[in-house]
Image (cartoon, helix red, strand yellow):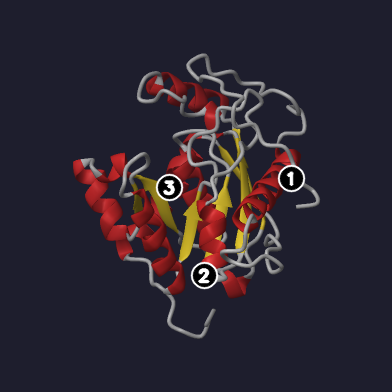
Amino acid sequence: MDTTRPTWQPPLIWRAALLLARVAVALLARLEVSGDVPEALRRGPLILAANHISPFDPIVLAAACRARGVAPRIMATGGLFRTPVIGAAMRRAGHIRVDRGTAAVGQALDDAAAAVSGGSVILVYPEGRIGLDPGMWPERGKTGTARLALACGAPVIPVAQWGSHEVVPYRAPKGLLRGLARAVWRRPALRVHFGAPVELADLTHGAPGAARRATDRIVDAITDALVPLRPDEPDRPRHVDPGRPTDTSRSHRRHRSA
């Protein structure tokens, strides 16, 4: 990929939102950011691949990215874009709409590929949903993130996060005010770690099984980065959200030799 071309410039509305996210997180919890994004990659092209544990994740990750000087374009569910005020703001900020479960879902991958090729940083959730693993470990990923990376040749940095589930419950807005009040009182730690780029150079776009192997490597890397963020919760989370369902059908098994 030609990294000498002009990179995408985040609009003022998105730069302001990143600052607002940092302020909002500071009011509710303690943000702890570790790891880094190499300076040469901060303005793209780059893919940030994160685990998904709570509706609050985008705000936490926006705050963490601001702390590391990164302004990613987020691949977000189409429902947000249909919201009158938020949807308009997200479109102006350059985020990418994903209409899951529809025939238009493939358009999101095309839009993301165009954005990455244009020098953007893209933030994606390889799991494709808020994870429902009983231990809240990353689920088996969808292959879209890997196909995007292999097609564009952009580096992938795993981003692990922990703690946002203690602020906003799974079924928000149900229970939202209670969760926010509890967070203000308890000030939970929200930990975010930026890992080293995932090694994908030996995989060829379009080769049989390449997307699946790349996906497993990405999810493995996110899982490895998550381990030190929850040292006292190796099996199950300490904070239990009674409204959060569980689903073991997409449990991820690490593929060290993939």
Find disc 1 in the rendering and name its residue: 224
Q: Marks 1 and 2, how far apart in space?
A: 25 Å
Image quadrant where residue 226 sits: top right
Residue 29 at what x, y percent from top left?
Answer: 54, 35
Farthest residue toward the front? 208
Residue 69 at what x, y percent from top left?
Answer: 53, 64
Find disc 2 in the rendering and name its residue: 152
Could you tell me if residue 191 is visible in this image?
no
Dot 1 lies on which element? helix
Find disc 3 in the rendering and name its residue: 21
Dot 3 lies on which element? helix
Residue type of the residue flagged with mark 3: Ala
Q: Is residue 8 above or below residue 187?
A: below
Q: Quadrant of the N terminus?
A: bottom right
Q: Marks 3 and 2, how far apart in space?
A: 29 Å
Farthest residue toward the top? 242
Residue type of the residue flagged with mark 2: Cys
Residue 102 at what x, y percent from top left?
Answer: 32, 42
